Image: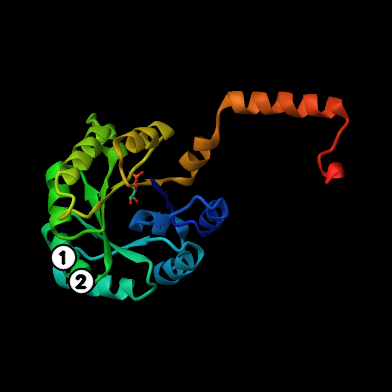
Amino acid sequence: MKFFVDTADLEEIKDLASTGLLDGVTTNPSLIAQSGKKFVPLIAEICKVVKGPVSAEVAATDYATMLKEGQFLAKIAKNVAVKVPLTPDGLKVCKVLSDNGTMVNVTLCFSAAQAILAAKAGAKFISPFVGRLDDIGQDGMQLIRDIVEIYKQYPTTFKTEVLVASVRHPVHLVEAAKMGAHVATIPPKVIRQLYAHPLTDKGLAAFVADWKKTGQTILDAA
Ligand code: E4P
């Protein structure tokens, strides 16, 4: 399973990239606004730090402008994935860009029917938002289960990767992995939560204390 980080905070991205576990980045207009940075130079910078796909979202909502924006964004770096909304115009843009070899991430997916359309439009990634479905009392993870199952029925024609988005806690990630989702895009805070377990901390404290009692150092023996 691939791990993307869902942030436009360059320092967070650098820090998480240093773990060697980061496969890509997703941004959206809200995250760009939070960063307070200029969009295009920021995406160029992120693309240098992380070699995997970096999602950059179009701002327009009409076909002609989205297409121009998408073509422009795709030129920033080879690893840009152009993000378009799951609308009729967005999917038209997805088809044109995908046919020309650009990676497209179709965002704001909330139903299996929408995910089928995105796969037919040649999307590299479909982004179902699990947390936002949970927020309105629906089962976000059921949507992931459905999309993974549907895409599996068409292994030669549906090449789209399921990119689990709007991840709110480690259980979302574990469930997505059990279902065979290809990618999860995870906020930095949730990535850090993945490491944590109180028994790890307790066990380590005991090992450190017991090791001190031996009076040895490993590197003295080197
Ligand atoms: C995905 O690409 C989106 O940026 C993101 O996962 C949205 O998450 P949110 O619902 O926490 O805003």
Where is residue 144? Give x, y as percent: 25, 39
Q: Residue at x 72, y 23 (%)?
A: 206
Which residue lies under the disc numbered 2? 67
Rendering coords of residue 54 (x, y %): 39, 61
Q: Residue at x 76, y 29 (%)?
A: 208
**Residue at figure coordinates x 36%, y 54% from the top left:** 30
Using the numbered discs, state the Cα–Cα distance from disc 1 to disc 2 in whole angstroms. Answer: 10 Å
- Residue ID for mark 1: 95
Q: Mark 1: which amino acid?
A: Lys
> Amino acid under label 2?
Leu
User: Where's the N terminus, which quadrant?
Assistant: top left
Residue 200 appears left or right of 205 = left
Instruction: Kindly identify the residue that appears in the image at 13 percent across and 56 percent down.
Output: 120
Quarter of image, res 73: bottom left
- The local crowd at label 2, few if under 14, some if 14 to 19, many if 20 or more residues have their Cα within 10 Å, is many
From the viewer's perspective, tell me whether residue 213 is left or right of residue 10: right
> First in sequence: mark 1 or mark 2?
2
